[in-house]
Image (cartoon, rainbow, N blue to C red):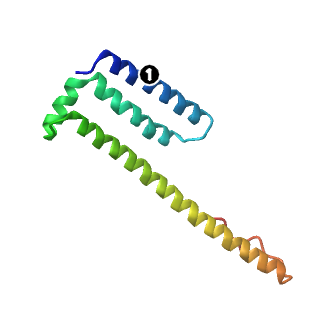
Amino acid sequence: MTTLQTKIVLILFFLVYLSYLTRSAARNHIDIYDYFALSCVALLPLGFGLLPVPITVISHWMGVTFPFVVLFGALFVVIFVYLHRLLNQLNRQTQFNKQLVQEISLLKAALESGKRADPGTISAP
């Protein structure tokens, strides 16, 4: 069972972390999908601390002796999904930057050769 001190610490961590995420989302530093994914990092331990009986039932149903192993696995999945999304965004940004560099090079070559580039020939990504 979880002690009162542990529950208080979990609740305080959840409130402080969620207020930080809410402030970051309000300032457009993170989008709403990131907000929900990152809030799971605080919500999962809170659920495990405040609801020990259902978590124990779930862990026994999964064949795991210790419930914290399920918590660790769930947090690993959350981090993996967030990292996968981050890598996809990075890949899209890299492709976009490559296209921009190519278009800038074409415009520069057209300007240096004395020709005027037709705005209709260069397409936006």
The residue furthest bottom is 113
Q: In terms of image quadrants, where is residue 123?
A: bottom right
Q: Quadrant of the C terminus?
A: bottom right
Residue 94, position in %: x, y?
A: 57, 64
Badge 1 crowding class, 10 Å Cα cut-off, few under 14, some 14 to 19, many 20 or more, is: few
Q: How many marks?
A: 1
Q: Name the amino acid, label 1.
A: Leu
Q: In terms of image quadrants, where is residue 59?
A: top left
Please give left or right for residue 108 compared with residue 67 in the image.
right
Helix, strand or loop at mark 1: helix
Residue at the (57%, 60%) spot, across then down: 93
Residue 123 appears in the picture as rendered: no
Residue 105 appears in the picture as rendered: yes
Please give left or right for residue 97 compared with residue 120 in the image.
left
Residue at the (86%, 82%) spot, across then down: 114
| Residue in the foreground of this view, choosing between 113 and 91 | 91
Provide the residue designation for mark 1.
12
Residue 4, position in %: x, y?
A: 32, 15
Residue at the (45%, 39%) spot, across then down: 38
Q: Quadrant of the N terminus?
A: top left
Residue at the (48%, 42%) spot, across then down: 33
| Residue in the foreground of this view, choosing between 110 and 62 | 62
Please give left or right for residue 85 compared with residue 57 in the image.
right
Residue 57, position in %: x, y?
A: 16, 30
Residue 65, position in %: x, y?
A: 14, 37
